[in-house]
Image (cartoon, rainbow, N blue to C red):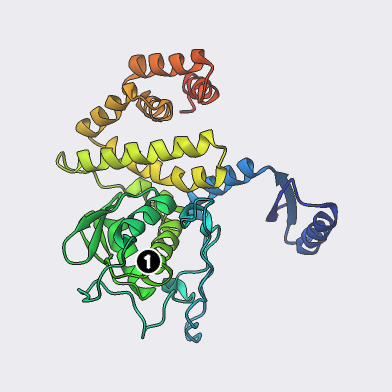
């Protein structure tokens, strides 16, 4: 009998909620058109399945808002969350995101109150570096490292020209200024920005747009990755290493949500580097990195073209029986079985 729908449930769901979901599955089942299945698993299993689904986006049809629907009002502001030390905890402040304005969702700010990069005359706030806070917030929510440039902008090196251009367009529709140039995405940052106003808005919008790119677009673009030039490889390699290190920190801390958000970006950067000899050399250079997680991922990806060197690295991680040992053993088993 044909499969009509799948309902995925976390194993922590209580009996009452589970009974309700089972009833929903029964209601969706139709003897003539197919059945609905109810499947449960822990968070790691659900994240893995979601990543697999996102990599097969060509098989799915996105359900969009009908044309002509009224434009939603700007979204209401979420409260700031602070660490025990009293600074904003950007990394955990948003665990979910509403639809982008690009796809009919509410823009982050109203059209009469945009965040612009035009030079402002207000003085910076004593004891508060607004630009540094935006840089930190973007890194904590996306793994990307913005750099200060002239004219009230931060420059962010993206994984591709397409990523930079798409994020730029999506950010502008949230009523936050942006521009792109090649692989670089530029977003506004000025010393006069207020923490609870412009600073928070810039970080929130970039986190929201980047999240959508990673979950819905990045995996689907892997097959059409454009080979970087030799001059572009060093910048991609730096971002590759930074993202891998952040992924390793999330894995070591058992932060499945953060690790999942970084996973697709790692695949995109790896795919770009693997397209050229210079890029593959860059990946091999990380086989001796001090970070075990950077070595693990790089060795796993280098197995197809540098098997002897990559196997030595993975065997060393496995034999050490420390962090990432299980991952290293699994990578070797998968490769030997012809599945990687």
Q: Residue at x 55, y 47 (%)?
A: 257
Q: Could you tell whether 137 is left or right of 5 in the image?
A: left
307, 118: nearer the viewer: 118
**Taking 142 as reference, is 306 above or below it?**
above
**Residue 58: in sight, yes or no?**
no
Q: Position of residue 159 (x, y in %)?
A: 30, 49
251 left or right, relative to 31? left
Residue at (36%, 58%) from the top-left corner? 133
Q: Residue at x 50, y 76 (%)?
A: 75
Q: Is residue 301 above or below residue 170?
A: above
Q: Crowding near pointer 1: few (<14 within 10 Å), some, many (20+)?
A: many
> Is residue 63 rendered to the left or right of residue 148?
right
Is residue 5 among what the camera can see?
yes
The spot of residue 319 in percent (x, y) is 50, 12
Dividing the picture into quadrants, the one containing residue 149 is bottom left
Q: Nearer the viewer, residue 270 or 98?
A: 98
- List x then y, in percent, for residue 35: 75, 56
| Pointer 1 residue | 199
Foreground residue among 189 and 315: 189
Secondary structure at numbered mark 1: helix
Q: Quadrant of residue 182?
A: bottom left
Residue at left 49%, top 24%?
A: 331
Q: Position of residue 73 (x, y in %)?
A: 49, 83
């Amino acid at each position: 009998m044909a499969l009509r729908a799948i309902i995925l449930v976390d194993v922590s769901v209580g009996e009452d909620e589970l009974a309700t979901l089972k009833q929903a599955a029964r209601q969706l089942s139709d003897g003539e058109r197919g059945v609905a299945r109810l499947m449960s698993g822990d968070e790691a299993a659900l994240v893995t399945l979601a990543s697999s689904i996102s990599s097969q986006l060509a098989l799915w049809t996105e359900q969009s808002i009908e044309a002509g629907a009224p434009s939603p009002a700007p979204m209401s502001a979420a409260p700031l969350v602070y660490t025990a030390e009293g600074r904003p905890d950007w990394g955990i402040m948003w665990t979910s995101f509403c639809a982008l304005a690009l796809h009919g969702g509410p823009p982050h700010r109203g059209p009469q109150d945009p965040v612009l990069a035009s030079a402002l005359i207000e003085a910076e706030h004593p004891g508060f570096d607004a630009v540094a806070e935006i840089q930190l917030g973007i890194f904590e929510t996306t793994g990307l490292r913005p750099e200060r440039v002239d004219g009230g902008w931060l420059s962010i090196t993206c994984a591709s020209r397409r990523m930079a251009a798409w994020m730029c367009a999506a950010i502008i529709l949230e009523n936050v200024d942006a521009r792109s140039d090649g692989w670089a995405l530029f977003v506004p940052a000025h010393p006069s920005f207020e923490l609870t106003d412009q600073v928070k808005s810039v970080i929130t919008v970039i986190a929201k747009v980047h999240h959508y790119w990673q979950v819905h677009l990045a995996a689907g673009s892997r097959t059409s990755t454009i080979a970087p030039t030799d001059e572009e490889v060093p910048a991609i390699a730096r971002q590759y290493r930074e993202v891998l290190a952040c992924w390793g920190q999330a894995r070591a801390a058992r932060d499945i949500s953060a690790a999942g958000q970084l996973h697709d970006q790692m695949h995109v950067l790896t795919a770009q580097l693997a397209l050229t000899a210079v890029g593959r050399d860059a990946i091999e250079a990380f086989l001796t990195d001090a970070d075990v997680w950077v070595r693990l991922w790089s060795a796993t990806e280098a197995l197809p073209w540098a098997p002897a060197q990559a196997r030595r690295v993975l065997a060393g991680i496995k034999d050490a029986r420390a962090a990432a040992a299980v991952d290293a053993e699994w990578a070797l088993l998968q490769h030997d079985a012809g599945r990687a």
